[in-house]
Image (cartoon, coloured by chain):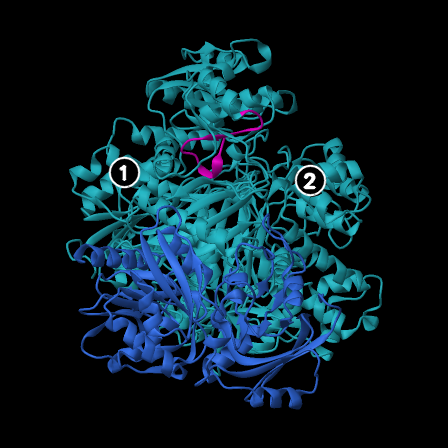
């Protein structure tokens, strides 16, 4: 069937901010869909609130709206754009829910918009577990026993049928939020009640436990002619009970015979037809009883998913792109396979390698969270690795994770080991290998973990290879053993550790023995046809297929797995570098190991190496490719950490020199430079012990900001007010050592903070974005909202920051991007930090100013003069016209971590961001809040409880809230102060004062807004309870006065207005010619 | 790392390319046509498919043996491949139906095998140079000598193999449930699953040796005739083709699969030719030219029917979308059709199972008009 000609304009909904369970994979799928539809000549309108994405670049769609994903906002876009169709299947659960909400609200009917890909009815069947279960019953498929409960009473009935353990999953939540496994009545009640609260429709599904069953996923595609193909099968290493997003997964399935695989395949085809997903991709999850092969259907996602991104990267079959084409009427046999060129997309990829996906967790950032994995997803990112054996894929994946410090277990007691094996946790893999190394048998480990013995046998085989290396001198390890170790992807570093040598010694030794990797191609077809796409992975075999070209080429090192502090923003920058350099005539070569990203799409760069970003793996690629330049500036801290070592090996790092990078990172060198330039910085020092730390703190005076060196995202960063806390920090939070000293800075209380991004080369420096933080100093810059242009700053301070920025760019010989953090206190501008690399805010600034910073930076790094772009010296001042404000706000994962205090501080916790744009600060902030998923109350009761220092400001805010029609309630002290100025305010108990207290009121829905600044240690418990209650019941809760003020501005801006004004980027910035 | 100690094995191709790996399976030597199969699962079915007689099979999926071997998934009573080539053989069989490891199974049936070679390099070589003769040896480590053995082996062109794999005596497979039709199956190397499919649809099947005369077949008064899959070059089957030609003149509904399809093509007066490296795997897209749909199918053929050699009264009904080769045909007036691929799957997807129903419907119509 040819493509449809009755539709011209298609609306694509993105997935919004990065959150746990919905990450960069939807930037990848959305970007592919935009490209595919535009190639087919359709006009694409895109809406996504997340500015840090490639898909929201103005070049990707005809009309790009970075606006909140709410019914009101999307309705306004539909009203303006009048699209013919809506493609809801490439923006994750968010887009699907939004499409259903638009349909339910009558918006689609009102404006004649057709849902393509999946119709509302099909989405409902797949998403509503009751309807899905009914459909499965009709199709003769078994789902786990159980049922739905909308109340505790109903739940009590259902558990009689399921027994314990029982699995509880709330309906319509992301990543299984609010679900869990209950082993006893007490846990059952707790989880059911939390689940009912978490579900937007107050419903939970309760099911029999199939814990320990084998878990499989199939990625299915269907076209309008009813052709169905399976793209990939995935087997979970961790059996049922661990969310698939938290499981190590492997493609293809490893332990199913063809008979069993084909029966899953048949079921998958029946299910996609039964549910009625017309076109595109779906993901279907199965559980298989390892004892008898019984099968249960777990769920179906009628859309492109995290697993389909993985399947696309694992097979080379671009699911999202093909799904978009199928949605407009093409059939699979009409679409060519990009990789083989000669064969069509109507086939099932076959692979001749093994793919392992390993999740990355950030439990260390949530100190009070229990490190336990269950049905609620907790990982923040993932890596994928490709190898010719499972062993190779797995161990390559493990080193892709960039564990700062590998967990090297010693002296674990049998009891603890047993517990760690039986209860899934983020470190379980290390405990499994420990057990296997310490004489535990495969059946024992299997009994505790329920992990298939086949996987355990593979691990055991690697342990056996290690046994042949450990405690021998490197030169005494025979070549065949080194080769076996490399075939199992044991890193040079690992071999060095085992033999007490250095990584370089191992590298040189094995190269002398002729043990070098070769590169094979991912080709969708197991080499049956020739591949025209250099999508490569390394292995230790005979034949090399890399075929490097003789062209001028540049390697871009990506940012590895997403984690808090290093997310999609850096992938955005890497992709831009690739696009720009490709256009400038270079061959671009991407190295990355994150399957969620646009950068690991095989057509983003000329060549793609799906490899870990370690020194060893990168050097191996450089040996083969011999590039003219390597870019380390765009991938965040990951490639930057390699810069010096690559440089020492003579690798041409382009852009800012590794020496300058080191200068900016080295406290002593940097301090000396600032002194020389006469630029103030907070007093500071470097400590390797508690004694040193105490001395420094005494010298510079408390409070101090403490943190380990060389980290991103404020890992283990804390503000310390006294010696006792400092002592505790030094003892518990970090291991200080001469190699890893602790940095101590004077903390500038209540200072205003700024993030400045700049572009520079030898002769020019462009100040790109002068972003004012909305939260005051002490909140990690990644967790603070920020606004462009600044709103509360004196012009002379702006000038000072511009001046310092230029000075620093010159002194550091910056070529490319640079980010500087400033603080202003008592009319003095301080430099807090300089990073001569792309920062987290580059995409935001690019979207707000309409100038593609990363792209320009890449061209500058490749040799073009910055002056040739004819940019004004200060983009913020000259590019943001009229009264327009752009605000970036963070989004937090606290709701996934029970027991964690959702308070902001110097350690970063946010996973993603949104942008709000408006013609006033309040309007922009309101949109940012809506985009971040907060409800902005227009009326109701505001609870205020602030510390003494904030009371003056609290009076002003309370007055404004009262004028807006809010009722005021306050804690005893705050209420007294508000009454003094004549405000009507009721007093409520704090948590430890009696009941009903403020938490009770929040839970019963009587409080619409919470303003609560910390009062210090004594009331910490109280405040935490308030914050958690507010989080759970989605009541806006601000913990800083500056944040409160901004929120009141936002409420004021939205007061009395139902309509939301939306603007496409293409209108906000007449398309920039500057980068051409 | 090796299953049977660290014994070396060699795989040599007739053009002189040699792969050094580790021996597993039985100790010994084998020659045959070197081919590859792209199915990621189903090695047991592949090993026991009689169509692989005379061939050394390389699996493109690198990890083989993971789920072991059981007694229900075999396509015949024994493995037929001459030798077996994989990247890594699993030491462990992990599946609730597994009864023994693949290594033990191959040893039991005296099939030599090699692992730990760059199978992708081997596949790319065959893809570019074509399927060719090979020798796999774990007893001779002299490269030149093993290459010579490959060169000295029988080429697949014009090779007759059906007589080696066909049944010695006719036998009957009873219908499941009520018997609706009696089908005679020409056994050129029939896979069990074809017989299971027919039986499941109510056919009593009389399986007859490949050299059974047309007269004897007609004498069995069948409602339908099934021409099975099998190994070898269809061009070598001149006598059988004559018999098939006589059989189909009788107007009995006839269904051919794979080798049976090729013999039908020749019986119609068409010609067959050898493909460069053939189709072997479970992911081949076949387009039904009459319905416009695409099915994902299981293939195992090194020869094909030449489209323009077929007479007017025969039409091509199915083509392979990868290379447009003929995958199905039917007679325009007589109740005869055939497919080049494997509707019985095993291993592979079940998309094409409906061809068995097509055959049943054909017999129903014949009954109705009789």
Q: Chain of mark 1?
A: A
- Give how far across and how far down residue A656 sits, in percent: 55, 67
Question: Residue placed at 36% from the left, 63% from the top?
Answer: B184
Tell which chain the image draws in cyan.
A
- The magenta stretch is A163-178
Q: Is residue B244 above or below residue A598?
A: below
Residue A936 - label: none
Residue B186 visible? yes
Quarter of the N terminus of chain A within the rendering = bottom left
Asked whether the residues under marks 1 and 2 belong to the same chain, the reply is yes
**Quadrant into which the C terminus of chain A falls:** bottom left
- A931 vs B94, left or right, is left
Q: Residue at x 62, y 49 (%)?
A: A681
| Quarter location, residue B305 | bottom left
Give whichever of A96, A1052 is nearer the camera.
A96
The Cα–Cα distance between marks 1 and 2, rounded to whole angstroms, is 42 Å
Q: Is B209 covered by the magenta stretch?
A: no
**Placement of A327 over or under A40, stated as above or below:** above
Location of residue A916 in the rendering, given as x and y in whole percent from the top left corner:
36, 42
Label 2 marks which chain's residue? A
Residue ID for mark 2: A448
Residue B300, image x, y percentages: 43, 70
Q: Earlier in the sequence, mark 1 or mark 2?
A: 1
Circle 2 crowding by C-alpha within 10 Å: few under 14, some 14–19, many from 20: some
Pointer 1: what residue? A121
Does residue A184 lie above or below B160 as drawn? above
Task: Check the rendered structure and report the hue given to chain B.
Answer: blue
Query: Looking at the rendering, which quadrant does residue A909 occupy?
Result: top right
């Amino acid at each position: 069937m040819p493509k449809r000609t009755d539709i011209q304009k298609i609306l694509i909904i993105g997935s919004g901010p990065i959150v746990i369970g919905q990450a960069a994979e939807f930037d990848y799928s959305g970007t592919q869909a935009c490209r595919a539809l535009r190639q087919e000549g359709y006009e694409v309108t895109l809406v996504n609130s997340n500015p840090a994405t490639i898909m929201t670049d103005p070049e990707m769609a005809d009309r790009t709206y970075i606006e909140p994903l709410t019914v009101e906002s999307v309705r306004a876009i539909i009203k303006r754009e009048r699209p013919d169709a809506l493609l809801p299947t490439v923006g994750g659960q968010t887009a699907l829910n939004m499409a259903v909400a638009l349909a339910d609200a009558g918006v689609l009917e009102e404006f004649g918009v057709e849902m393509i890909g999946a119709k509302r009815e099909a989405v409902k069947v797949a998403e509503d577990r009751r309807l899905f279960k009914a459909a499965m019953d009709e199709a003769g498929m078994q789902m786990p026993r159980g049922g739905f409960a909308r109340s505790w009473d109903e739940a009590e009935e259902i558990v009689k049928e399921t027994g314990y353990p029982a699995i509880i999953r709330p309906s319509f939540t992301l990543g299984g939020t609010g679900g869990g496994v209950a082993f006893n009545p007490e846990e059952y009640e707790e989880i059911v009640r939390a689940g009912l609260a978490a579900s937007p429709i107050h419903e939970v599904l309760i099911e029999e436990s199939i814990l320990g069953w084998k878990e499989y996923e199939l990625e299915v595609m269907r076209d309008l002619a009813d052709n169905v193909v399976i793209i990939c099968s995935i087997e979970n290493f961790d059996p049922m009970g661990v969310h698939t997003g938290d499981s190590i997964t492997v493609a293809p399935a490893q332990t199913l015979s063809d008979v069993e695989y084909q029966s899953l395949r048949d079921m998958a085809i029946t299910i996609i037809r039964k549910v009625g997903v017309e076109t595109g991709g779906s993901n279907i999850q199965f559980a298989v009883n390892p004892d008898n092969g019984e099968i249960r259907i777990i769920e179906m996602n009628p859309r492109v998913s995290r697993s389909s991104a993985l399947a696309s990267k694992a097979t080379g079959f671009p699911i999202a792109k093909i799904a978009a084409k199928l949605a407009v009427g093409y059939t699979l046999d009409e679409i060519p396979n990009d990789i083989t060129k000669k064969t069509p997309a109507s086939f099932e990829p076959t692979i001749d390698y093994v793919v392992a996906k390993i999740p990355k967790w950030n439990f260390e950032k949530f100190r009070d969270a229990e490190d336990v994995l269950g049905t609620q997803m907790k990982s923040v990112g993932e890596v994928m690795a490709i190898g010719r054996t499972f062993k190779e894929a797995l161990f390559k994946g493990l080193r892709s994770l960039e564990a700062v410090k590998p967990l090297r277990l010693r002296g674990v007691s049998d009891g603890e080991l047993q517990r760690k094996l039986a209860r899934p946790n983020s470190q379980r893999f290390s405990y499994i290998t420990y057990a296997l190394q310490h004489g535990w048998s495969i059946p024992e480990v299997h009994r505790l973990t329920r992990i298939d013995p086949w996987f355990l046998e593979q691990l055991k085989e690697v342990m056996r290879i290690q046994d042949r290396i450990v405690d021998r001198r490197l030169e005494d390890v025979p070549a065949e053993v080194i080769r076996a170790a490399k075939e199992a992807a044991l890193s040079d570093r690992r071999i060095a550790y085992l033999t007490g040598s250095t990584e370089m010694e191992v590298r040189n030794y094995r190269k002398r023995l002729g043990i070098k990797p070769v590169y094979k191609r991912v080709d969708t077809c197991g080499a049956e046809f020739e591949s025209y796409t250099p999508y490569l992975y390394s292995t230790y075999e005979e034949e090399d297929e890399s075929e490097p070209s003789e062209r001028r080429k540049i390697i871009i090192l990506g940012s590895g797995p997403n984690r808090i502090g290093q997310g999609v923003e850096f992938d955005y920058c890497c992709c831009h570098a690739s696009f720009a350099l490709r256009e400038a005539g270079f061959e671009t070569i991407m190295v990355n190991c994150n399957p969620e990203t646009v950068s690991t799409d095989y057509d983003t760069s000329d060549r793609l190496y799906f490899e870990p970003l370690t020194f060893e793996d990168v050097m191996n690629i450089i040996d083969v490719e011999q590039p003219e330049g390597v870019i380390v500036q765009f991938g965040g801290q990951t490639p930057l950490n390699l810069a010096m070592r690559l440089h020492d090996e003579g690798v041409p790092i382009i852009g800012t020199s590794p020496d300058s990078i080191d200068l900016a990172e080295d406290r002593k060198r940097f301090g000396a430079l600032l002194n020389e330039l006469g630029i103030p910085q907070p007093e500071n020092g470097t400590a390797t012990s508690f004694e040193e730390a105490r001395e420094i703190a005494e010298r510079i005076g408390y409070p101090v900001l403490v943190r380990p060196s060389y980290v991103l995202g404020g890992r283990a960063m804390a503000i310390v007010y006294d010696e006792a806390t400092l002592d505790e920090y030094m003892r518990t939070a970090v291991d200080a050592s001469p190699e890893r000293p602790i940095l101590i800075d004077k903390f500038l209380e209540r200072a205003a903070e700024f993030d400045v991004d700049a572009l520079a080369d030898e002769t020019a420096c462009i100040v790109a974005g002068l972003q004012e933080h909305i939260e005051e100093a002490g909140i990690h810059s990644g967790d603070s909202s920020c606004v462009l242009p600044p709103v509360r700053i004196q012009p002379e301070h702006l000038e000072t920051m511009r001046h310092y920025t230029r000075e620093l760019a010159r002194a550091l010989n910056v070529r490319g991007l640079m980010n500087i953090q400033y603080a202003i206190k008592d009319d003095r501008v301080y430099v807090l930090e300089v990073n001569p690399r792309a920062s987290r805010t580059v995409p935001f600034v690019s979207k707000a100013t309409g100038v593609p910073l990363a792209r320009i930076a890449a061209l500058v790094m490749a040799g073009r003069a910055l002056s040739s772009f004819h940019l004004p010296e200060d983009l913020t001042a000259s590019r943001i016209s009229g009264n327009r404000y752009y605000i970036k706000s963070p989004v937090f994962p606290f709701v996934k971590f029970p027991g964690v205090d959702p308070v902001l501080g110097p350690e970063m916790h946010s996973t993603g961001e949104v942008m709000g744009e408006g013609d006033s600060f309040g309007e922009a902030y309101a949109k940012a809040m809506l985009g971040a998923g907060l409800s902005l109350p227009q009326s109701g009761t505001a609870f205020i409880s602030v510390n003494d220092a904030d009371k003056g400001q609290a009076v002003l805010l309370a007055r404004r809230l009262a004028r807006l029609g809010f009722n005021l309630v306050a804690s005893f002290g705050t209420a007294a102060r508000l009454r003094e100025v004549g405000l009507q305010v009721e007093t409520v108990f704090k948590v430890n004062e009696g009941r009903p207290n403020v938490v009770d009121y929040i839970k019963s829905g009587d409080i619409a807004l919470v303003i609560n600044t910390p009062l210090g240690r004594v009331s910490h418990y109280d405040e935490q309870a308030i914050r958690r209650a507010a989080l759970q019941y989605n009541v806006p809760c601000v913990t800083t006065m500056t944040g409160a003020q901004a929120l009141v501005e936002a409420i004021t801006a939205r007061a009395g207005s139902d309509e939301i004004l939306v603007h496409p980027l293409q209108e906000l910035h007449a398309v920039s010619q500057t980068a051409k | 790392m090796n299953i049977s100690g660290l014994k070396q094995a060699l795989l040599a191709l007739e053009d002189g390319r040699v792969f050094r790996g580790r021996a597993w399976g039985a100790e010994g030597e084998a020659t045959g046509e070197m081919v590859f199969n792209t199915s990621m699962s189903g090695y047991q079915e592949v090993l026991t498919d009689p169509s692989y007689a005379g061939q050394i099979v390389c699996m493109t999926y690198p990890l083989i043996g993971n789920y072991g071997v059981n007694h229900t998934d075999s396509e015949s009573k024994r493995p037929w491949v001459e030798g077996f080539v994989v990247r890594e053989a699993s030491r462990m069989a992990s599946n609730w139906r597994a009864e023994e490891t693949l290594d033990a199974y191959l040893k039991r049936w005296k099939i030599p095998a090699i692992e730990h070679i760059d199978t992708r390099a081997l596949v790319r070589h065959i893809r570019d140079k074509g399927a060719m003769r090979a020798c796999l040896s774990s007893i001779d480590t002299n490269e030149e000598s093993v290459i010579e053995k490959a060169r000295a082996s029988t080429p697949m062109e014009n090779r007759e193999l059906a007589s080696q794999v066909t049944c010695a005596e006719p036998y009957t497979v009873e219908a499941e449930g009520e018997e609706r039709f009696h089908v005679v199956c020409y056994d050129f190397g029939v896979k069990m699953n074809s017989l299971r499919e027919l039986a499941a649809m109510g056919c009593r099947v009389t399986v007859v040796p490949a050299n059974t005369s047309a007269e004897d077949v007609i004498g069995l008064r069948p409602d339908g005739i099934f021409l099975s899959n099998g190994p070898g070059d269809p061009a070598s089957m001149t006598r059988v083709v004559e018999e098939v030609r006589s059989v189909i003149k009788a107007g009995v509904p006839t269904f051919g699969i794979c080798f049976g399809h090729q013999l039908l093509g020749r019986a119609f007066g068409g010609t067959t030719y050898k493909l460069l490296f053939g189709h072997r795997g479970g992911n081949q897209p076949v387009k039904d030219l009459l319905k416009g749909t695409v099915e994902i199918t299981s293939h195992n053929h090194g020869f094909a029917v030449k489209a323009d050699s077929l007479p007017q009264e025969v039409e091509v009904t199915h083509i392979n979308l990868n290379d447009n080769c003929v995958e199905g045909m039917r007679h325009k007036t007589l109740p005869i059709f055939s497919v080049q691929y494997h509707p019985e799957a095993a291993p592979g997807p079940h998309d094409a199972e409906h061809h068995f129903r097509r055959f049943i419907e054909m017999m129903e119509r014949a009954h109705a008009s009789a």
